[in-house]
Image (cartoon, rainbow, N blue to C red):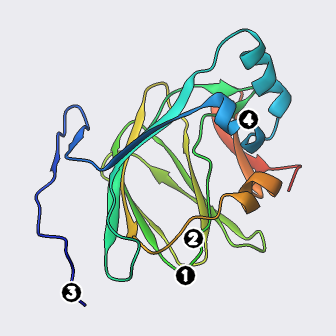
Amino acid sequence: MTSTFKPESVMLNLKTYVMQPFKRRNQVKLSDLKEYFSNPKAADQILSKGKNPVVYEYCDYSTPEVEGHLTFGVTTIYSGKVGKEYYMTRGHYHEKDAAEIYLGLSGRGLLLMQTKRGNAAYLDLKPGDIGYVPPGWGHRTINTGGEKMVFFFVYPSDAGHDYELVKKKGFAKIVIEKDGVPKVVDNLRF
């Protein structure tokens, strides 16, 4: 396979977690995510006060969506909750059987994964932890700490993303604060 892409060096500043150069940057606000939380009414209450906080943002070095290329980048999830549920990414399945790697850089949280049948697993993700998402497993990352959670990710560029299944049912488990600590509990919507 020939490629028009040339080798390139990308710098990740390990103090600021800014990646240069990047090809795409996106901020995801609460209004973009309210249906992904187990209690959308709690999200509506925040939004009704004129607040629409950034829940997470990412920048990536995306390559053509063809076999052989990798996309990688950095995601930052801010600290906060909607009701009792911690801030999180949307979560998705890959459209193609593909794995993904996450490397914790700052803060702490959980990497929540599940099969389409609802078999769930989760891993701690803190600085230095590497989380492996096997092919076929949906995944979402949750910030359970009091500061920003930052992680590096890499996946095959042709993997594709299916967010709709997660939007409809959520994940079988959610992460809430109970008695001041994170708890993984059943999602009643699932």
Question: Residue 52: where, in percent of width, then height?
Answer: 63, 20
**Other residues around mark 3 within 10 Å, as few (<14) / some (14–19) / many (≥20):** few
Residue at horizontal 80%, vertical 23%? 44
Q: Which residue is mark 4?
A: 34
Quadrant location of residue 16?
A: top left
Q: What secondary structure is marked by label 1?
A: loop
Q: What secondary structure is marked by label 2?
A: loop
The correct choice, above or below, for 172 with respect to 12 in the image is: below
Q: Which residue is mark 3?
A: 2
Q: Residue furthest top?
A: 49
Q: Which residue is mark 1?
A: 97
Whichever of callouts 1 and 4 sits on the residue coming sooner in the sequence is 4
Whichever of callouts 4 and 2 sits on the residue coming sooner in the sequence is 4
| Kind of residue at badge 2 | His
Is 36 situated left or right of 136 in this image?
right
* Label 3–label 1 contact, CB within 8 A: no
* Label 1–label 2 contact, CB within 8 A: yes
Separation of disc 3 and disc 1 at Cα? 23 Å
